[in-house]
Structure formats: C-alpha cells, structure tokens
Image: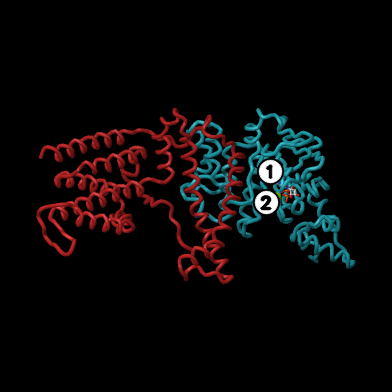
Chain colours: A red, B cyan
Amino acid sequence: MRKIVIGQYYPATSIIHSLDPRIKLGGTVFFIVTLFTVNEWGAYAVAISALASVIALSKVPPKFMFRGLRTMFFILVFTASLNIFLTPGENVLVEWFIFRITSEGVSQAARIGLRLITLVTASTVMTLTTTPIQLTDAIESLLSPLKKIRVPVHEIAMMMTIALRFIPTLMEEVDKIMKAQMARGADFDTGGLVKRAKSLLPLLIPLFISAFRRADELAQAMDARCYRGDVGRTKMKIMRFARRDFIACVIAIIYAVALTALNNFL
Amino acid sequence: MEIIFNTESLSFEYISHDEKKEQKTLALNDINVSITQGEFVSILGHNGSGKSTLARHLNALLLPTAGTLWVKGMDTKNAQNTWQIRQTSGMVFQNPDNQLVATIVEEDVAFGPENLGVPSAEIRQRVDWALSSVGMSKYADVGPHQLSGGQKQRIAIAGVLAMRPDCIILDEPTAMLDPRGRKEVMQTVLELNRNQGITVILITHFMEEAVLTDRVIVMDAGLVVMDDTPRNIFKEVDRMKKLGLDVPAVTALAHQLRNNNIELPDDILTIEEFITYFKP
Ligand SMILES: Nc1ncnc2c1ncn2[C@@H]1O[C@H](COP(=O)(O)OP(=O)(O)O)[C@@H](O)[C@H]1O
Ligand SMILES: [Mg+2]
C-alpha cells in the first residue's frame, strides 16, 4: 500500500513550529503580497534572506523546502519562457524567425521566476511547520469576523477537517477497489483517453456509494457525540498570542519597511 | 441500584418510501426491559432482529413511534432531554473509520466534550484520562489512519468516555476487527465496567464475548425473546439454533457429548470449565 501523508507537516521543536498558526498563516499571506510589490534586486535580496532565516529557524532540513517546487517546475518554466519571449525591449540579444530575446526579457523572466520560487517556498515552510488541524483552526479564527455577515465559518472549517480526515481513508479505499477490479480483469493503464475514462467508471461508482454511506454514518456518530454546530462549543486547544508572536509581528513590520525603502528610494 | 434504562411497550416502525408505495417495517415490537446502572449486558439476535434500532433508541438517535423509553428517568421523546441523554449514554459504532472526526487522536477524543461546552483545561484532563483508560496515551498525537482497527475502536471508546457517560452502548464494535483487535476491545470494555462502574451494552455476533457479560438479551423479529444470564441462555442450545444463533463452541461440543450419553452438565461456557470434567 502507498504510504499516505496528509499535508506535509514535519514535526520538530522550533520557534517557527511553536508560533501561533494565525501568525504563520497571516504572515505567509503578508509575505506573498509584499513579493508582488518588489521589483528591485536589492529588495529581492532582503525578501530572500528573510525567508532563508525563517527556514534556518524552522529546523526543517532544506531539502524538504524544495519538494513543493518539483510539482511547480513546469509552471515555473512556462511562465519564465513566456516572459523571455513576450517582454518588449530594446536590447536584443538573439533574434530568430518571430522570436526575439531581449535583455529586458531575460531580466523580467528571472525576476518572475525568483518571485514564484520564493512564493512556493514560503507556503511550503508554513505547511511544513503547521499541522493541518492548526491551519483549519487558524482559518476559522481569522475568518470569524465574517460570522457577523452570516458566513458559516465554523461549518467551513469543520468540512475542511473532515475532508483532511477522510482523504487517507478514501485513498485506501480506491486502492482496494482498484485491486478488486483488476483481479476481475479490469485494465486502468492502457488505451486511449476515452477508454481510460470509461475504465474509471467501475472505480468511481463504488467509491461514491461508499462515500455517501460513510457520510451518513459519520453524521450519526457526530450526532451521538452531541455535535450541534458551534453553539456553546469550546475548544481544547486555545490559540494564544504569546510574546514570541508579538515579536514575530514586529519583525514582519520592520521587514516590510525595509523592503519598501529598498524598493522605492534606492 | 439505580435503573438507567427503562422501557414500556417500546415500539418502532421504519417508514420507507419506494416509488409511490410506502413500506413499513416494525423493527421493535412492544419491548419491555429495564437495565440497572453498572450492568454489563449483551444483546444477541440474527441480522435484522432490531438490535441496532434498539441501540439507537437508547441514545435518542431514534424516537419510539409507540411506547416510552426513559434514560435515567428522562423521557427520550422530550426534545429538551436529548443532549443530556446523549451525554449519559455514549455510542460506539461498528465501522471504526466512520466515527472518528478529527485528524489527530487527541483532537478526536476532545470532540465530544468540546461539543458539550466543557472548559478547555478540563477537556485536556478528560482527554488524558480517557486515553489512559483505554491504554492509548502513547498515540495521542498520531492520525487515526495510522492505527489498527482495534486501536481505532479504543479511540472511539475514549471519545465517548471523555463525555463522562454513565453507559456505553457498542453496536457490533468488533465485527470488522481481527481476533487481536476483538480481544483488545473486549478487554477495554470489561475493565471500564469493572473498575469504573460504567454500564455497558454490547451488541455482538460473537458468543465468546457474550459469555463474558452479566446478562444476555436475545432479540428476534423486533421482540425480546430471552433475557437471562449467559449460563441459562446458552443451556438452550436447540432454542438458540432455532433463533439462528450459535452457542459458544465448547458449549455446543458439551451438548453433542451429552446427546451421546457422556455425562456432563448442560451449562458449560468456557474451555477451562470443560477441562475440569475430564481431569482424573
Ligand atoms: N433505515 C431503515 N429504513 C428502513 N428499514 C430499516 C432501516 N434500518 C433497519 N431497517 C429494518 O429494521 C429491521 C431491524 O433492523 P436493525 O435494527 O438494523 O437490525 P439488526 O441490527 O439486529 O441487524 C430490519 O428488518 C431492517 O431491514
Ligand atoms: Mg445492526
């Protein structure tokens, strides 16, 4: 059986792991937003060293950081090539047929590439140091003002938790059904697109039927354990803003100021 | 001792609609039983005899269509009692996968008390206590998908325990487990009953499990047909066969031997007892 990992949490004891998940989530979003305001190389250097320091503090081996990049590789190459060829510029380096590469294009592609790499790595750092359940809690807490305008924030967070809980269960089930069908001569790996899509049907139907049965049983089990939405509900783990979280906020502000300064005044 | 469950002519009818026609199934037919605090009761009966339907009544997941059920004196039909009743009698279901809600064991155990609005510090204590009561403290931080079936059921039991119930109802909790998982679950439940005085109602297909309980209720077609100690129930090998039920293998063997004129008592339940009659 395949080994199934949900999220990509890397357990370790580090200052980054112990930060309030809301700070990590908010901080990551903040960092990504600032990346889009950055254009000067000096500012890039600041952003990248900031990220590098966080990685160092997180005690997660760096090779895990770049795993996220592997799946992003094609998007990265694609975006970079688009930029190389489509950026208008004066300083032509190579010209062939309708293609023309300018130095402006190369520099733009490098910047975009760097921005993407930094962005993906930053979100990888967050998911490596935060458990899925902490993340959903953080989302619930950060979105809780929306409850006032009747957005079902608690229910959304609960749905995410249940989805996370059942991903491995359903994957195991797919595996089991596939083996059962293969034992009866089903073939999932050959043939054209239409044939392959058709061969998935005997996989999907039992999967859906079982998922509905599971949903029904889970709903009963939740009822039996007195679940009634978030009325009168408490939490075992309360997220608390500690001193380290405050320090993290201050550092984030200093970082933002430095970045803006480098970007606009140098 | 205080009575925890008490029924009076409890009946329940499922109404299902298939294409125009309305179909009624009388799943419980005039049930009168009472169960005392601290008892360990097993419920036997072949498929469709109404065991699960009865279990769901004890937890107010289903409400009687006729008659009444009281849980610690609370009428289940009164909607104001529902949450109190569900806290009093916790429920463990057959499929260990479909009753765990959270991605981390301790978070799942905390789910019930969180729903009840218990203060955070107390939830923490209850979770630690519940996990140690089922011998799963080591696994507090792992994901449910990393556990064996028996371990998952013990977590489900811990999740119920954390609500501080008076009674735990288990609906075929061992049906999907291997022999080792079955043993683990039975051991856990027995200890809870003996050491903590928690009432246990165990629905099972395994006669060896029923032997370990104080009282056996046998159901057939929505009726309670037998209600006695395991010793008196399994004595009636032929009657059990007619009800589509087995008796423990060693009891059946003793019965066969007796039919062949070998002198043995008719209420042998365990291998140990059986052996004593063959020692010189
Ligand atoms: N949701 C349902 N809708 C209609 N009939 C049902 C439903 N659940 C159970 N029944 C019927 O009620 C009877 C008792 O079922 P159940 O309590 O599940 O028996 P047991 O648990 O002893 O196998 C059976 O005849 C069954 O077909
Ligand atoms: Mg049943």
Chain letter of the residue beneath label 2 in the structure image: B
Q: Is mark 1 within 8 Å of ligand 2?
A: no
In this picture, residue B59 sits left or right of residue A134? right
Note whether A184 is above or below B128 in the view shown: below
Image quadrant in which the N terminus of chain B is located: top right
Q: Position of residue B190 (x, y in %)?
A: 66, 48
Q: How many residues crowd mark 2 within 10 Å: few (<14), some (14–19), many (20+)?
A: many
Q: Is residue A220 left or right of residue A171?
A: right
Q: Is the residue at mark 2 in contact range of ligand 2, meaning its CB lies under 8 Å from it?
A: yes
**Structural crowding at the residue carrying mark 1, measured as other residues with C-alpha within 10 Å and reported as few (<14), some (14–19) or many (≥20):** many
The residue under the point 62% across, 43% down is A220
How many badges with numbers are in the image? 2
The answer to which quarter of the image holds residue B90 is top right
Q: Which residue lies under the disc numbered 1?
A: B200
In this view, the mark in front (1 or 2): 2
Looking at the rendered structure, the secondary structure element under dot 1 is strand
What's the distance in space between the residues labelled 1 and 2, CA to CA? 13 Å
Residue annotated with mark 2: B172
Q: Residue furthest front?
A: A98
Q: Residue placed at 62% from the left, 57% from the top?
A: B177
The residue positioned 45% from the left and 60% from the top of the image is A3
User: Please, what secondary structure does the residue beneath circle 2 have?
Assistant: loop
- Closer to the chain start, of discs 1 and 2, is 2
Check the picture and name the quadrant holding the C terminus of chain B.
bottom right
Disc 1 marks which amino acid?
Val
Examine the rendered structure and indicate whether residue A255 appears above or below residue B229. Answer: above
Tell me residue B214's x, y (percent): 75, 46
**Side (left or right) of A10 relative to A106:** right
**Near-viewer residue (A75 or A137):** A75
Q: Chain of mark 1?
A: B
Task: Point out which mark residue B175 bears.
Answer: none
